[in-house]
Image (spheres, grey):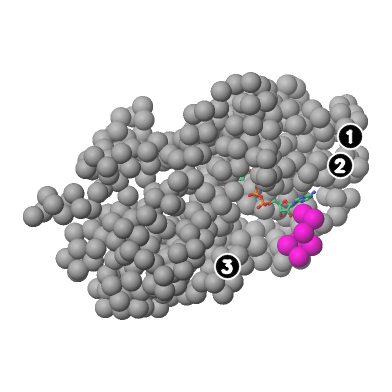
Amino acid sequence: MKIAIVGTGYVGLVTAAVFASKDHQLYCIDIDQNKIDNLKKGIIPFFEPGLDDLIKTSLQEGSITFTNDYSIAIPQADIVFICVGTPKQSNGNADLSYLEAAFASIIQHIEHFTIIVIKSTVPINSHIKIMKDLHIDTKKVELASCPEFLREGNALSDAFNPDRIIIGSSSDKVTKTLLKLFEDFQSPKLVTDIVSAQVIKYAANSFLATKISYANMIAHLCESISANGIDVLKGIGYDPRIGDRFLKPGVGYGGSCFPKDLSAFISLFKDYSQDPSLLQSTQQINNLQPYLFIKKVLNKLGNLENKNLTLFGLSFKPDTDDIREAPSIKIIELLLKYKANINAYDPAANINIEKIFGKQIRLFNDPYKAANKSEALLLVTEWPEFIHLDFSRIKSLMKSANIFDGRNALENQKLKLQELGFFYQGIGINQEYKELLLV
Ligand SMILES: NC(=O)c1ccc[n+]([C@@H]2O[C@H](COP(=O)([O-])OP(=O)(O)OC[C@H]3O[C@@H](n4cnc5c(N)ncnc54)[C@H](O)[C@@H]3O)[C@@H](O)[C@H]2O)c1
């Protein structure tokens, strides 16, 4: 099939790469000229494992074209996927200006019957207003919603083997075409109406965010009653009805999806006079996590003024350079308020963090250099490489051997770290209590 992708961000590029590798012809449009110029050369604007190779192969094979000209892409396409951003506005609602602009440009260039599939996460019924405002002829255009569930860092594997494919459409013709398009994906496929598809996306992300906040809530209770929060959550997670994924305590969730989708979902509840208090609590608990993490550092080190602290991990999760709403940002802001000297190391996100904090923090391309003369390591993002660091070397470089593990990533080597002389504090276990037990 001939497919146009509007918006070449994470979702758009990954979607394009997957369909191009399945022998479809892809036309990718973005308004960002610089991005398109780079993509034509095979340069990917962000870090996502495996994506650059796949895009380069499709470029060589001629199955993918990048352009900023809608008139080149849209008239060719049988199906147009809209993958533009829907960021959070200051009032918590989704900003639909990119979506509206994309629709307006697509409509201008449609020459034959075309299916427009919204992959962006959008508030329910937003398509109806857009269809009305643009006087869209429903004989020429039919809409569908196929929300995206990929996880950055795992995006390709998620896109090739999605947990589920949701097709929201009230038209048999559209449904048939989309089922054909997704024919060789071995995933459960749910055909539903557009609004239900839109709700599925928000409800899924809100549930996952709530699970994380629940884990954090339990972890902090356990700290205060001297229970082992990590064991408690493990014990809960063995129940297959609950499951252990997303049941890990830490410095909170971030990224371009959970915070904004939760806000938009809460707005939806309010708009329809429904009670969003469970989701509001999820948000409140999450917002507290960076403060609770820094409180642990303060309890141990006292005043942070002029103390050298080292952050390991800045991206909102491992295997990505994405720092949108990353907990590291809030943590850095807090540490700057306490006038700490901040060193930081991230395998991929240094450049993006530098754009926000400039010279206020010192960024390193080597974790050992970042730890030099430091009084505490703060592990913020659980990149796998941190588990394999040479901690005896790190200890020899540090001024004081303190580790605050905001993801419990080093929990399994805690005893070894303590033997090396580190003070180690994760999330969910009251360190003083454990020390008392050892006496
Ligand atoms: N990133 C994720 O992990 C993820 C996962 C699932 C769903 N989503 C949803 O998918 C959507 C896209 O997210 P993303 O992270 O890929 O966004 P992104 O910000 O990485 O990319 C959006 C792209 O759209 C382009 N764009 C904006 N307006 C345009 C227009 N009028 N015409 C053409 N291009 C235009 C931008 O230049 C940008 O390149 C959002 O609604 C998001 O919530 C994202």
Q: Residues within 10 Å of mark 3 (few under 14, many from 20)?
A: few
Please name whichever residue, 346 or 340, is drawn nearer the observer in this view of the structure.
340
Q: Are marks 2 and 1 in contact (CB under 8 Å)?
A: yes
* In the image, the residue with mark 2 has its CB under 8 Å from the nearest atom of ligand 1: no
How many angstroms separate mark 3 from mark 1 (CA)? Answer: 41 Å
Q: Is residue 370 visible?
A: yes
Q: Position of residue 338 (x, y in %)?
A: 45, 64
Please name whichever residue, 25 or 343, is drawn nearer the observer in this view of the structure.
343
**Of discs 3 and 1, which sits in the foreground?**
3
Q: Where 273 falls versus 419 (above or below)?
A: above
**What is the number of callouts on the image?**
3
| Residue located beneath label 2 in the image | 104
Q: Residues within 10 Å of mark 1 (few under 14, many from 20)?
A: few
Q: Give the side of residue 351 with respect to residue 118, left or right.
A: left
* Earlier sequence position, callout 2 versus callout 1: 2
| Residue located beneath label 3 in the image | 357
Q: Residues within 10 Å of mark 2 (few under 14, many from 20)?
A: some
Q: Secondary structure at mark 3?
A: helix
User: What is the three-letter code of the residue carrying label 1?
Assistant: Leu
Q: What residue sits 60% from the left and 65% below the top? A: 356
Q: What residue sits 33% from the left and 71% below the top? A: 375
Q: What residue sits 23% from the left and 53% below the top? A: 431
Q: Secondary structure at mark 1?
A: loop
Q: Please provide the residue range marked out in magenta.
A: 30-36
Q: Is residue 428 magenta?
A: no
| Residue located beneath label 1 in the image | 134
Please name whichever residue, 333 or 264, is drawn nearer the observer in this view of the structure.
333
Check the picture and name the quadrant holding the C terminus.
bottom left
